[in-house]
Image: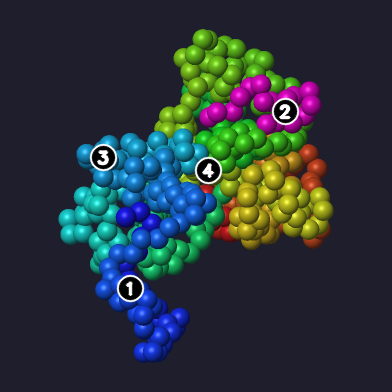
Amino acid sequence: MEGSYTGDFLNLGSHSHPVKSNDLTGGIQQKWAEILSNSGRTIGTDFSQVGKEMVTQGYEIKKYLDVGKTSFRNPYILNPADYKNQEELFNALKHWWIFRYRKRDTTIKGRLRDAKNMSQHPLFPVDWLDLNPNQIIAYLEYREYHEFENKRGKHQVRNEWKTVKTIAKAFGINAELWGYIPPNPPSPKVRIIPFPTDVHRIVHYDYSKNRYTNSLYQYVLMQGFLIGWRPSELVIQKASDIHIEENYLIITETKKGNQARQIFPEKQILSGHQYKSFKNWIDHWRPQVENQYSGDYLYLQPNGKPYTVDYLRKLIVPPVKQLWGHYSLYTMRHWCAIARLIKDYVERDTWDKTDVQDWLGHEKVGTTDNYTKYAKKYYMNAPYDWIKAILKYHAKNVVGENGKKSINPLFLGVSTDFTGESKDAPVGIRTRVVASKGRHDWPLHYRSINDSSSPERIRTSVAGSKGQHD
C-alpha cells in the first residue's frame, strides 16, 4: 500500500507508554484487542495531499540525481562498460579530454600512449575497461622497485600515475583517495643554454643553398631565441598577430586553452631593416611561398603549408645539434628566459621576475624562479645584456696588425674557441675577456686576439674540450 509502513504499533521505543489493566474494559478493551491483533502487520496511513506531493517530489529528485542507478547519466563521465575494446575507450577518452575537459591534444596523446604500454605489461597488465586500484598500484610499485633503479625511471612512474588519475577522472573516480604516493620527483635538470657567441653562430649559419629555406632556418632561430615561444605556440603564430606599427605581439597559448598573451619586443626584432625582423620576414620572404594552403600562419614550408611541431623539430634540430650539441626546440625558450632575466638585472640592478613571468606566460612565479638561479650563474660568466648583444653586435673577421685574419671574440665576457696562429698560441687555447666590476656594456670596437696591444683584461685559459665554458 502506498505510503504505508510495517512495525509493532505498541513498540515505540522511547515514546512507548505503559497501559494499565483496568483501562482495558468495555469498549476500550474491545478496541485495544483489535489493535493488538494487528500488531506487526502493515498499517495504513493517511497522508495529507501536501504530504503526498512532497514525498512524490522527493522520489523524483532522487531518481534523477542518483547517477548510475537510473537511466540518467552524467554526460561528462565515461562508463567503460559502454565500449567493446580498449581502442574505442581511448578514442572516447581523447574526445572527452579535448572537447569536454578543454585541454590540448598533445597531453592526452602522451597519456594514452602510456596507457597502452601499461595494458601490455607482462606481469601486471592494466585493464582499463575494468579499473582495479589494486591492480594499478601493484603495477606502479613493481615498476618503481623492480624495473627502475634510476631517477629517470622514477620520473616515468610519476607520468604513469598522472595517466591513471586522468583516466580515473574521466570515469568519475578520484584516484587520490586510493592512498598511493608516487616517488619523489627527480632532481632538476642542469639548464644548459648557449652563450651569445653560440647563438650568433647558430642564427647566421648557412643551412641550405636554397635562399628561402636558409632564411627560414635563420629567422625561426633568431626570432625563437628572442621571443621564447613554446614550440606549440611558434607553429601556430599568425602573421596578423604581429602588430608592427603598435610595437607588440599577440601569442596564442595552446597550453592554456588558446588564450592570448601580449608582449612588447624590441623594435629591432619587430621592424629593423638590418635585422632578421618580423617585418622583413612578412614583407619579403613569406610572400615567396604563400598560397591557398598558407592561411595566416607566420612560418611556412617551401610548399606554402604551415608547420607542425613534429615536422619543425625534425627539420631544425638535427642541423643545429651539429653546431651546438645540446640544442632542442625548447632551448630557445630557456635561453630567452635567462637572457631576459639578465637584461632586467643589468637595467635595474635587481633580479625582477615579474616581467619575465609575464613575457613567457608562466602561471606560477616559481617556474620563473627556477630560471633565476641559472641566470645568476650565467651572468657571472658573461656579465652584460645578452639581448642587446644579440641585437647589436655582429661577428666579423678582423685584420690584425700582422696582416693576418683572426677570429674576433664576438662579445666581450664570453669564452671563444679559436685556433692560434702563432707558436705561443697552441690549438685549444681560448680567450676570455674578464669584465671589470659593474661594467655591463662594451664598445663596438674590438682588437684582434693576436694583437699585442689588446687590453690586459683579456686572459687565456686551457680548454678541456671544445665548446666547454669555464
Q: Dot 3: few (<14), some (14–19), or many (≥20) neighbours within 10 Å? A: some
First-in-chain label (4 vs 3): 3
Q: Residue at x 46, y 56 (%)?
A: 47
- Which residue in the protein does label 4 denote? 330
Numbered badge on residue 419: none
First-in-chain label (1 vs 4): 1
First-in-chain label (3 vs 2): 3
- Which residue in the protein does label 3 denote? 83
Secondary element at image label 3: loop
Q: Dot 4: few (<14), some (14–19), or many (≥20) neighbours within 10 Å? A: some
Secondary element at image label 2: helix
Q: Residue at x 48, y 25 (%)?
A: 307
- Which residue in the protein does label 2 denote? 270
Image marks 2 and 4: residues in contact by CB distance under 8 Å: no
Secondary element at image label 4: helix
- Which residue in the protein does label 1 denote? 35
